[in-house]
Image: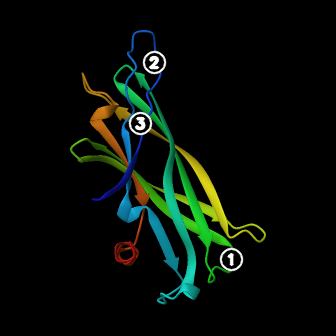
Amino acid sequence: MAVAFAAVALLAACAGDDAPPGPCPEVVLLSDASKQVKFNGQGRDLTDVLFEAEIEPALVACEYDENVLDVDLQVRVIASRGPANSDRLANINYFVAVARADQTVLAREAFDIAIPFPGNRTRVSGLEEIGQIIPLAAGETGSNYRIYLGFDLTPEELQFNRANR
């Protein structure tokens, strides 16, 4: 999987007096899944676009508590209304996956966000906070893990992204 960019991990504060501070997992935005263009029906003309969306990690913070890493991730989704969008709403699906540094996926969860386009606005954003609990083995820190972020795309949407880089 190609990586568009990785957010800079923030150092976490101590969870307790005895717990040493440690790094958060690296957040990786998957380049092939960082944008979504949703079309109305089979057409692929500009007039067939329901919405275009971009996803980005806004902030990551973590806290160590014994053998557990508690990660709080903010996810920002920015949507632009297309000409075919008559209901003034973008229903968007994205995923967050936790993996080891060797890319072995341990957990993957899908999320939905509905972003309305109020009034005459054609570009809006939504911000969501997602918590992840990562059990740590002895000697592990957040640097042993990665958090992958992207849109849940159909095969056609993925092909469109790859063809329009």
**10 Å crowding of disc 2: few (<14), some (14-19), many (20+):** some
Which residue corresponds to mark 3? Answer: 9
Q: In this view, does 40 lie above or below 21?
A: below
Cα–Cα gap, marks 1 and 3: 38 Å
User: N-terminal of the two: label 1 or label 3?
Assistant: 3
Cα–Cα gap, marks 3 and 2: 15 Å
Q: Which image quadrant is residue 77 in? A: bottom right
Cα–Cα gap, marks 1 and 2: 47 Å
Q: How is the image coloured?
A: rainbow
52 horizontally vs 12: left or right: right
31 horizontally vs 144: left or right: right
Which residue corresponds to mark 1? Answer: 87
Q: Which image quadrant is residue 146 in? A: top left
Q: Give the residue type that dot 3 points to.
A: Ala
User: N-terminal of the two: label 3 or label 2?
Assistant: 3
Which residue corresponds to mark 2? Answer: 14
